[in-house]
Image (tube, coloured by chain):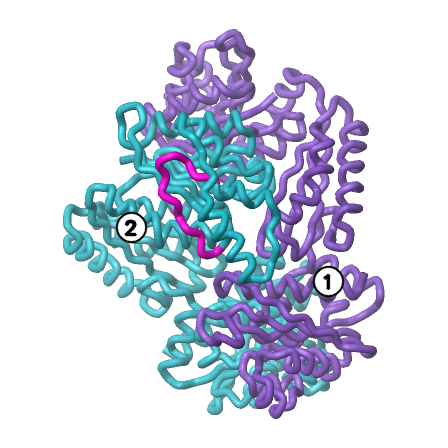
Chain colours: A cyan, B purple
């Protein structure tokens, strides 16, 4: 069983945008034992899209098409798949009624052009879109004497993922022969990719039946372990055994053995201890708070804090003595310490985190270069300060600083 | 003239790796007046690669193939292109000699399997690789009565870029008719994609020589206008004329006519007025601050603010009267107003922004459902409050709220 993923949209044929849905879709298809053999990106041109769909139908068993289901003139996926299949397209009255009802409930008016989203290919099952207006379509058909599975999915990632997870996965599981695939995701913080690989390669090379992939991204390492066997217990056994040996080798560098994010782990530990956290962020400018509050239920342990971008705010919101800033500079271990202690006291939390640094591109000096970051973690007992010198651009420095800060909290809580 | 980019390599058909060369290649091809019509990603399978090359030769004029030129068993691009073209492959003795000479100069030994890198397709011009061992190939041929340009390039980005820039660009400039491309990027906030399209389609349809693409992402609309003409002034004239008419139609919904982000525009307006801004974020949890501080130089106008996730912090950091929260609830227009006014006063800024809402998935009620957000903007003269009801998941609601908040500031500053 092989698949082709077709991403539709002229924007993905510009130098500015890339298809990202295919990474998610590949992961899900692989879990079902379907390998992706081709990925095609095609623009909003009728002739080209029909051609791409025809080629896919000719060469693979499963065709997943994303994008081009919206209401605009450019959205041609329905028409083009119908043309490629030689099937008719019928406007579904129920879908239209549903569309207007939902718009009314949300108190928005929708324009007539939205109605084309209710066009259904002959023989297709309509896939409801709980997160947007464009419904998807599922086809399980015979084409040129071969069975083909086709999915038309909306382009926006949240809509596509929801629809694929909730509706396509069960349909695919029914339609495809059973395969057992076990996976594990391990995560480590603040270790280099090659350093990590040098430590674990001698281990994973002893498991040729487990595919091990290393992904590195801004202070975060993700290890993906995948094993396919006729039966799930066999596959799971191998993956778990390898995971245990890697955990042992990486020890406390590893923060997650089930794929959780660093912020999830931090919140989990805080919750377990019934402890609360507040942050005072200068160079990270809200990044730490944003990552923590992105997790549902984070309010149980994370109260918030201050983005103290200007020196005045360091004093006003986190109680930093202006003389301290005057003597040592805003980017100093003293000010990081005062930020952590100040925000902890102001917010009456168990833990206080303070971050100050030079994210660049301007603002650096010989003594205090771009990339210099001080991080402090305060508890009622003590305050620890860490100095880091990161390299790279503003984006990289900010993200590395936020990652380091969260890892500092995790290590204290462990 | 249209092109297809084929990226060869099974690793790009996993959930973990993506082709990135195509973004660079697209930019360069566009500069030469060549639009990319298809991108194909194919693995190291002979049958699949031959098929991909054949399809490309059938449907486009220019085919750029990256990857699969190395010395391993998996590297099949030379063989597959030769097969697709029905041409022979000859091992070039000079290239082999050159390869061994270079290895000797670098004091490395190379294995026999490297010799396959000297296989040249009949009629191809060899492209030297100054940054690696695999040479590229250039073909300017007649295939099925049509002229086709084919390039075989190495996969590693540095090698591909060097080879394309130094050798393919001059060859393409000679081979292609002269064209010039003008582009413009317009951006609009908080308007639906279909609503936007309904308003501007009657305009851009009058400019069939300008390609107009609409990109929608969480309350942000990006319009890409591209026009290709023999001479640049002609192309620029058409793009600018269409841009002006769209600007007129969308009026104040449009926030950028040169591609700037909403946060850049907000900071630009604040800077022009010598005004400062502070934010008090509840449901957006740092997202607004993070977007603003991501822009270099933002500290000139943005001082920071508070992430007031808990009710206590709304009082402690933004001075909200606890009785107000008790009477109206944390998610209310009254509390949004108090947040905006409180943070403005605390931070002594010209503008204060307050956001409170229910991001979900929990915490909603019939009266105050998930997605309900109150936004307030305070100035020394007055405070305005806006109520919005967003739909979707936590991620979407948070991002729409942040976008709406920034747009609220922009509109006030305009």
Regarding residue B290, the answer to whether it shows in the image is yes
Identify the residue position indicated by label 2 in the image.
Answer: A170
Disc on res. B62:
none
Q: Position of residue A61 (x, y in %)?
A: 30, 33
Q: Quadrant of residue A407?
A: bottom left
How dense is the environment of label 1, judged by Cα within 10 Å: few (below 14), some, or many (20 and up)? some
Above or below: residue A361 compared with residue B126: below
Q: Compare residues A52 and A301 and report the one nearer the observer.
A: A52
Would residue A197 be counted in the magenta stretch? no
The residue lying furthest to the top in this view is B145
Regarding residue B12, the answer to whether it shows in the image is no
Q: Quadrant of residue B405?
A: bottom right
Q: Compare residues A34 and A148 and report the one nearer the observer.
A: A148
Above or below: residue A107 compared with residue A140: below
Look at 38% across and 49% down and name the residue there. Answer: A164
Would residue A126 be counted in the magenta stretch? yes
Q: Chain of mark 1?
A: B
Q: Position of residue B272 (x, y in %)?
A: 84, 62
Element at badge 2?
Answer: helix
Look at 22% across and 46% down and name the residue there. Answer: A208
Q: Position of residue B125 (x, y in %)?
A: 53, 15
Look at 65% across and 63% down and name the residue there. Answer: B404
Task: Locate residue B111 relative to residue A103 in the image: left or right.
Answer: left
Q: Are marks 1 and 2 in contact (CB under 8 Å)?
A: no
Q: Position of residue A354 (x, y in %)?
A: 57, 78
The magenta span reads A119-131
Disc on res. B297:
1
Q: Compare residues A346 and B93 and report the one nearer the observer.
A: A346
Marks 1/2: CA–CA distance: 50 Å
Q: Chain of mark 2?
A: A
């Amino acid at each position: 069983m092989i698949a082709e993923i077709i991403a539709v949209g002229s924007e993905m044929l510009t130098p500015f945008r890339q298809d990202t849905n295919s990474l998610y879709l590949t992961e899900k298809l692989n879990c079902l034992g379907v390998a992706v053999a081709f990925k095609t990106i095609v623009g909003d041109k009728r002739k080209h899209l029909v051609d791409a769909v025809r080629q896919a139908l000719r060469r693979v068993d499963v065709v997943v098409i994303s994008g081009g289901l919206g209401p605009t003139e450019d959205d041609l996926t329905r028409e083009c798949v119908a043309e490629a299949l030689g099937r008719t397209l019928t406007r579904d009255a129920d879908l239209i009624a549903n569309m207007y009802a939902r718009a009314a409930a949300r108190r928005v008016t929708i324009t007539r052009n939205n109605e084309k989203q209710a066009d259904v290919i002959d023989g297709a099952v309509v896939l409801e879109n709980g997160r947007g207006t464009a419904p998807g379509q599922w086809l399980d058909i015979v084409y040129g004497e071969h069975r083909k599975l086709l999915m038309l999915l909306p382009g926006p990632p949240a809509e596509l993922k929801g629809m694929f997870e909730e509706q396509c996965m069960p349909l695919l599981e029914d339609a495809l022969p059973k395969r057992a695939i076990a996976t594990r995701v391990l995560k480590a913080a603040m270790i280099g990719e090659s350093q990590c690989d040098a430590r674990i390669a001698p281990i994973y090379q002893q498991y040729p039946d487990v595919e091990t992939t290393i992904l590195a991204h801004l202070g975060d390492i993700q290890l993906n372990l995948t094993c396919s066997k006729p039966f799930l217990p066999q596959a799971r056994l191998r993956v778990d055994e390898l995971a245990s040996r890697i955990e042992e080798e990486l020890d406390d560098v590893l923060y997650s053995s089930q794929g959780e994010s660093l912020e999830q782990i931090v919140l989990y530990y805080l919750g377990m201890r019934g402890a609360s956290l507040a942050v005072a962020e200068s160079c990270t400018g809200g990044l730490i708070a944003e990552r923590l509050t992105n997790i549902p239920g984070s309010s149980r342990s994370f109260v918030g804090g201050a983005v103290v971008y200007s020196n005045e705010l360091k004093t006003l919101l986190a109680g930093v003595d202006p003389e301290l800033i005057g003597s040592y500079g805003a980017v100093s271990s003293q000010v990081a310490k005062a930020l952590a202690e100040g925000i902890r006291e102001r917010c009456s939390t168990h833990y206080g985190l303070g971050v100050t640094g030079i994210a660049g591109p301007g603002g650096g000096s010989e003594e205090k270069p771009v990339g210099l970051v001080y991080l402090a973690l305060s508890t009622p007992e003590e305050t620890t300060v860490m100095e880091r010198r990161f390299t790279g651009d503003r984006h990289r420095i900010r993200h590395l600083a936020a990652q380091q800060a969260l890892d500092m909290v995790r290590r204290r809580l462990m």
